Amino acid sequence: MAYAPLNPMDLYDVRSMLSEDEQMVQDSVARLVDDKIIPVIQKHFENHTFPRDLVGEIAALGLFGSSIEGYGCAGMNAVSYGVICQELERGDSGIRSFVSVQSSLCMYPIYTYGSEEQKQKYLPRMATGELIGCFGLTEPHGGSDPANMKTHAKRRGTDWVINGSKMWITNAPIADLCVVWAMTDEGVRGFIVERGTKGLATPEIENKFSLRASATGALFFEDVVVPAENMLPGSVCGLKAPLSCLTQARYGISWGVIGAAQACLAQLIDYTKDRVLFGRPLAANQAIQIRLAEMARKITNAQLMSLQLGRLKDAGKMTPSQVSLAKWNNCRAAIEVARDARDMLGGAGISAEYVPIRHALNLESVITYEGTETIHQLTIGRELTGVNAF
Ligand code: TGC
Ligand code: FAD
């Protein structure tokens, strides 16, 4: 019996395990990526600019706050959010980052910990992309240990006064509002700080070699007065609230990086078939085929892990440790694929004509943010042993 050829990007036909709705979401985002993002992204990466004119197109597909029910959001399931991230990151990690931050790190905390007034005020306008958000947790003295937070909010009458700084904040330079975490006398709490509030500065971090199509900045708070109604009332004193947002974003990243790896492998397969060295196509060498097979193995593992994670999430059973395992495994897999693809392109691998160098550079950020690889390894170690080694 002859078997139909497999899709090199999906050797286990993971797509067939998606529902019809999930496949439709994947197809519509894939079209956006192919038609609108891929043609312009390299220029934005080179120029270190965020493609702001894409925001409306992303919003039109319902990709902001896609998992939220109501408030103008699409109310899709977790697996759909996953395929959205995968397709966007096939284009560029910076675009997936933009959507992750808007959805998982800004709309999610407002939806989960915000008052009804806050939800009504911000979520519908964030869903349309009219308002852009950022999430300020990391501080300059050490992002892995957010419990050691120096930024503080003190009560003054019914207001809060925030002082401190945040570092490495995606979207900070372009955000209309910041979801900021600050230490209070009762513990860490979340606040919504709007652009234009006196004492808030959001300078861009220039000269990045990674995520150059994403706007990254710092947040400085100098006696920033925030009215009581801008405190997230459900963010009950502690790190649980911000860490729960990270769980949402890390879940999406586990899917997203698969797209970056697929983009590298797809281009590499074509290249190794076309390039002739020592009288035969590069693809005819065993060493090359083994390296391509390794890439397909890593991608397939990552796909299966994220899909199962998504099904657990949709069933309400996903745990933070499971997310750590997928974030660690899939980022490691993707960065290895991108670096190896860069190498197999030879000198062309450093050219902007090919995608692996851009994905590899981006993935240096992705493997670091949302918990470094070490943080996720130690989370699994703690899960296995019950011993906290942080
Ligand atoms: P601990 O203080 O013991 O725990 C506090 C409470 O939080 C609970 N918890 C979680 N809940 C939900 N999701 C998680 N991932 C959670 N992790 C912990 C925990 O159960 C506890 O609850 P309770 O009821 O007992 O109070 O904190 P920990 O020891 O668990 O955490 C330590 C550690 C190192 C894992 C944590 O601090 C950590 O994750 N550090 C890394 C920080 C990080 O990832 N920062 C990311 C900043 S945002 C970002 O990078 C955005 S990039 C976006 C983009 O562009 O895409
Ligand atoms: P550190 O915490 O100083 O870590 C330095 C090194 O020490 C790492 O290798 C780490 O793994 C290791 N390490 C730490 N603890 C241990 C330990 N116990 N044992 C062994 N090794 C350890 N943050 C936000 O809040 N919002 C954002 O939107 C955001 N966007 C980002 C965008 C980009 C492009 C980047 C690069 C970062 C972003 N971050 C954001 C910050 C990111 O979350 C942090 O960079 C990350 O959490 C690591 O913190 P750090 O950079 O301070 O490194």
Image (tube, rainbow, N blue to C red):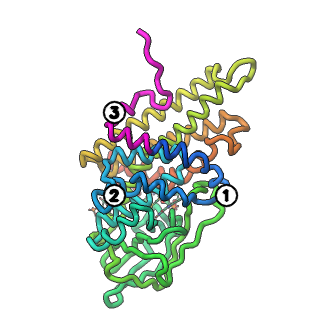
**Residue that carries the numbered disc 2 in the rendered image:** 73
Q: Does the rendering let one see residue 141?
A: no
**Residue that carries the numbered disc 1 in the rendered image:** 47
Which residue lies at the image location 51% right of the left edge and 53% below the top edge? 95
Q: Secondary structure at mark 1?
A: helix
The numbered mark, 1 or 3, whose residue comes first in the sequence reads 3
Give the percent coordinates (x, y) of residue 111. 31, 64
Which residue lies at the image location 62% right of the left edge and 24% below the top edge? 287
Q: Secondary structure at mark 2?
A: strand
- For discs 1 and 2, the disc positioned in front in the rendered view: 2
> Residue 17 shows which numbered tag?
3
Q: Please report the bounds of the magenta region as a residue range.
A: 1-28
Quadrant for the N terminus in the image: top left
The amino acid type found where label 3 is placed reads Met
Is 299 rendered above or below residue 68?
Answer: above
Residue 116 or 247: which is nearer the viewer? 116
- For discs 2 and 3, the disc positioned in front in the rendered view: 2
The numbered mark, 1 or 2, whose residue comes first in the sequence reads 1
Q: Residues within 10 Å of mark 1 (few under 14, many from 20)?
A: few
The amino acid type found where label 2 is placed reads Cys
Is 275 rendered above or below residue 327?
Answer: above
